[in-house]
Image (cartoon, rainbow, N blue to C red):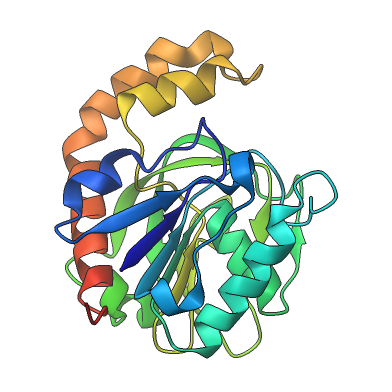
Amino acid sequence: MLQIIQNGSEVPPGSITGHLATPHIIHHPYCDGLLPKLVDISALIVLGGAMGAHDDSKYPFLSDLKSLIKTVVESKIPYLGICLGGQLLAASMGAKVESCRWEEFGHYSASLTAQGADDRLFKGIANEFDVFQWHHDSFDIPPDAVLLASSALCPHQAFRIGASAWGVQFHPEVTEDIIRCWSAWNKSTSGRVEELVTEFEVRSESYRATVGQMIGNFLSTVKL
């Protein structure tokens, strides 16, 4: 079964769930520390979170989650990591995750690399596409991984390692409610809530198309 890891109450799956035509379970290890068993995972999506990929001492479940991610990749089980989920994938596979580098908050565009344009996760997505960003941290590309997308401020926007494990820095799952929540509790954006929401309304059709295509592409790799 498809398993989804939610790493904080303020970082829900958002619009992703509306594109899931398959049974799935959402786990909340930040509450109970519980993660799915490998035998029960047909595919794994790990969402974002306010913590860093190396904040294991404050969030002990992260150690177990990184071990699970590494095992999932080695077992060739499809994996999609979003923001923190992408950073955890990078860290699990030996790459650096750095704080306060290439920060982005708000609406941007990302560009596919030549490899990204041929990658099945991005099939049907334009070479330049709208994205919503919300991150202090950013990942390096793991050894033997392929860079799939970049942006002007953050050159590492997406990568694939192996045949079916992807990490993305941007947030394809955002909704108006999520944007209101995140921008309100961030001091640098608390005065821009309505501006960010208005721009989301302008880009919402583009965002909806991207998340629908991406999730559909990801699920096409899953044997359920």
Q: Quadrant location of the N terminus?
A: bottom left
Q: Which quadrant, please, contains the C terminus? A: bottom left
Q: Quadrant of residue 111?
A: bottom left
The answer to whether 157 is drawn above or below residue 122 in the figure is above
**In the shown orientation, is residue 221 left or right of residue 39?**
left
Of residues 173 and 117, the one drawn nearer to the viewer in this rendering: 173
Above or below, comparing residue 27 to residue 88 in the picture = above
User: Relative to residue 22, is residue 184 drawn left or right?
Assistant: right
- Mark yes or no: residue 140 visible: no
Q: Is residue 71 in view from this perspective? A: yes
Counting from the top left corner in percent of width and height, residue 121 is at 30, 72
Give me the residue at 28% from left, 70% from top: 218
Task: Tell me how many marks there are.
Answer: 0
Residue name at image x 49 percent, y 64 percent = 36
Q: Residue at x 52, y 82 (%)?
A: 73
Q: Is residue 200 above or below residue 161?
A: above
Vertical relation: 189 (above or below) 104: above
Q: Quadrant of residue 197?
A: top left
The picture places residue 194, in percent across and down from the top left corner, at 39, 11
Residue 36 or residue 8, whichever sits in front: 36
Q: Nearer the viewer, residue 107 or 213?
A: 213
Q: Is residue 72 left or right of residue 221?
A: right
Where residue 119 appears, as percent x and y from the top left, is 31, 80
Residue 172: image location, x then y, percent: 35, 48
Figure quadrant of residue 178: top left
Q: Nearer the viewer, residue 216 or 57?
A: 57
- In the figure, is residue 164 to the left or right of 5? left
Which residue lies most toward the right here? 57
**At x 52% / y 25%, what residue is drawn?**
182
